[in-house]
Amino acid sequence: VRAEGAQAVEGVARYADTLRGHVNRCKLGKLKLVVGVPSGVVLGVFLFGDEACELVHYGMELVASKRTVYDVRDTMFTAVTYHELFKNAAEDAIAQIAEPSPSARAAITTSE
């Protein structure tokens, strides 16, 4: 994404930080959303951990339908599922879009 000149942030969520992760005592696993700036469109999804093969389909749908992290944040997920990862990663990306890191600010400034 960055090689093509597009600006992006990475929203990250860990399995251990979800309710399901606490219930299952899951210490490993992570979801990363690659998100376009400033649009918030989900450009890519990286996922590993328990039930990743079940969750990746939702990530594929987000990319294929050009959904945004704002859509993900506003979607209600059933309690005690790993889909909470998507909401957590979306919130992380939204925070970065709202307040870019110093290196991201420098990249945006130099590209303008």
Image (spheres, rainbow, N blue to C red):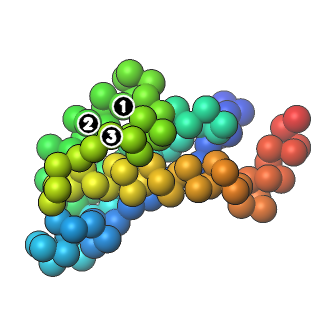
Q: Is residue 42 visible?
A: no
Q: Residue furthest left?
A: 24
Pick the residue in front: 62 or 74. 74
Quadrant housing residue 14 = bottom left
1 shown above or below 103 = above
Q: Residue at x 22, y 35 (%)?
A: 57
Q: Which mark is residue 58?
A: 2
2 or 3: mark nearer the eye: 3
Q: Residue at x 12, y 73 (%)?
A: 23
In the rendered image, the vertical position of residue 62 relative to residue 89, given as above or below: above
* Residue depicted at 30% across the width and 28% down the height: 61
Q: Which of the labelled discs sits on residue 62, or is there none?
A: 1
Asked whether the beta carbons under mark 2 and mark 1 sit within 8 Å of each other, the answer is: yes
Residue type at the position of mark 2: Tyr
Marks 1 and 3 sit apart, C-alpha to C-alpha, by 12 Å
Q: Is residue 47 left or right of residue 42?
A: left
Task: Give the x, y percent position of residue 72.
Answer: 39, 40
Discs 1/3, front: 3
- The residue that disc 3 covers is 75
Element type at mark 3: loop
Q: Amino acid at mark 1?
A: Leu
Which element type, helix, strand or loop, lies under badge 1? Answer: helix
Amino acid under label 3?
Thr
Q: Residue 71: give x, y in percent of width and height.
A: 42, 35
- Give the Cα distance between marks 2 and 1: 6 Å
